[in-house]
Image (spheres, grey):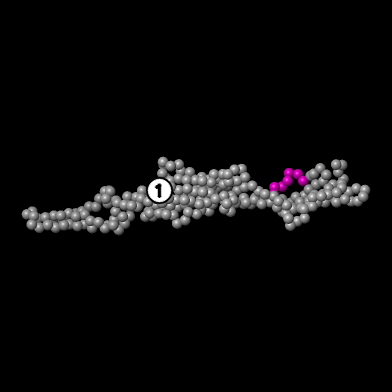
Amino acid sequence: TGSWTYTLDNSRAATQALNQGDAVSDTLSVSSLDGTASHNIVVAITGANDAAAIVVDATVTDDRTTVEAGAAGSGDPSASGKLTVSDVDDGEAVFAAPASLNGIYGSFSFNAATGSWTYTLDNSRAATQALNQGDAVSDTLSVSSLDGTASHNIVIAITGANDAAAIVVDATVTDDRATVEAGAAGSGDPSASGKLTVSDVDDGEAVFAAPASLNGIYGSFSFNAATGSWTYTLDNSRAA
């Protein structure tokens, strides 16, 4: 009858290797019984974009945790790993270069050819320094296959640490730390006062703790934990 059909086999490697828009063909040549006539049946084939896949490379340690440096130690600022991309389309089993490698608390590096990545926590950044002891935050790098059909989020878990505070005398206020007992010659000088300033990069921790006791041997203190202002009053009635 001369009828013919053609079935494209999507399971074949040659078919799967076709990229989006690739134009190829398959040809069947037929002839008359006596060989005096022939005809080529040429089937036009257009490639499509096959989906890629991204997985964690199991042959490499996948470390996605970091710890801020603090008063107690240097922390753990580094993380690293490797991803693998697969794509049956010819030449597309590679990653696209990320638009940005900068995170909130640190920065990434990413090799689009190999899938290897690193993350370095930047302890000099204000956002990192503001983390309190035990705070749990994260930085994320989203990577994708060259054709955009697969993506993977590299999420780095970051744990905050306790940064050291500092206490100094407030230079804007007179720091008077001398008192004199009242005696036969006069009433003395029973009062002293001043102000301290506390600084701490950890969020909400630039304040003083309330002293356990304000009572001294010879007198008593007052202390404002919110402002750092203090006074001392010598108690001339005490036996000491």
> At 31% across and 52% down in the image, what residue appears?
90
User: Would residue 93 be seen by someone viewing this image from the given angle?
Assistant: yes
Image coords of residue 72 (percent x, y):
61, 43
Work out which residue is located at the far right of the displayed protein and give it.
Answer: 184
> At 29% across and 53% down in the image, what residue appears?
18
> At 62% across and 47% down in the image, what residue appears?
163
Work out which residue is located at the far left of the displayed protein and give it.
Answer: 34
Q: Is residue 190 left or right of residue 107?
A: right
Q: In this view, does 229 lie to the left or right of 32?
A: right
Image coords of residue 83 (percent x, y):
41, 47
Please name the amino acid that badge 1 sits on: Thr
Image coords of residue 102 (percent x, y):
50, 54
Q: Quadrant of residue 75 in the image?
A: top right
Question: Which region is colored magenta?
Answer: 208-214
User: Would residue 151 be seen by someone viewing this image from the given angle?
Assistant: no
Q: In which quarter of the image is the N terminus?
A: bottom left
Q: Nearer the viewer, residue 42 or 168?
A: 168
Q: Which of 58 and 120 is in front in this view?
A: 120
> Is residue 162 found inside the magenta-colored segment of the image?
no
Q: Nearer the viewer, residue 16 or 169?
A: 169
> Is residue 209 found inside the magenta-colored segment of the image?
yes
> At 39% across and 52% down in the image, what residue appears?
95
User: What residue is shown with label 1?
Assistant: 114
Q: Nearer the viewer, residue 231 or 102?
A: 102
